[in-house]
Amino acid sequence: MIRAHAKVLALIVGVLFVPLSLVGCARNEDSGETRIFEIENTEEVFGKGDEVDVTVRKHYMILNPPEDLTELKELVEEYGKEHPIEGGIDVAAGKSRLFHMYFYRESDDLPRDWQPDEGYLNTDRLEHHKNDLIAAMRWSDVDPRKRYDIYDKSEDGKVVERLRFVEDQLVG
């Protein structure tokens, strides 16, 4: 009798568990679509007080970035236009603002749900993930021309190719 109940219970658990686990896997599966989002808890604003400049750094993850570096530059440029960061930072008269937007690829070391860790024995900050940095954009109030560094990197983070742009002009 107990064996029969155990078998029925196991069957019920199996019938419920298998479909739920498959649904969970489907949600984590990558659609292959390129997507950009801000990495939470990584915005940096510094240079307050008596310093001349205020620097704003924001960090983003690009899922499935284009392999073509010109397309990657255009993607980053369009994202910057659609998600401006200048409006959120006010500075005192006489100060200027420097803006930096950094874009990272997803990897085993930097998964899409990565968060900084300031643990006592273990720290994990974005500066530890430069191997996954694939694009950077910077400008300032003084010089509003956008500068882009776009990278093709190997799996281990070595730069295979780098393109530099000032606005739409390819430079050295």
Image (spheres, helix red, strand yellow):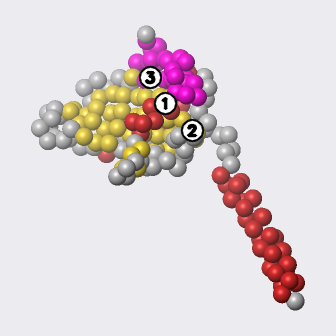
Position of residue 158 in the picture relative to residue 16 (left or right): left
First to last magenta residue range: 148-171
Residues at circles 2 and 1 in contact by the CB criterion of under 8 Å: yes
Between disc 3 and disc 2, the foreground one is 2
Quarter location, residue 154:
top right
Q: State which quarter of the image contains the N terminus.
A: bottom right
Q: Which tag, 3 or 2, sits closer to the chain's start?
A: 2
Q: Is residue 30 left or right of residue 58?
A: right
Taking 16 as reference, is 133 left or right?
Answer: left
**Secondary structure of the residue carrying numbered label 1:** helix
**Mark number for residue 107?**
2
Name the residue that disc number 3 marks: 149
Looking at the rendered structure, the kind of residue marked 1 is Asn
Q: Quadrant of the C terminus?
A: top left
Q: From the image, tell me which residue sits under label 1.
A: 131
Q: Disc 1 or 3, which lies upstream in sequence?
A: 1
Would you place residue 169 above or below residue 72 in this image?
A: above
Residue 86 visible in image? no
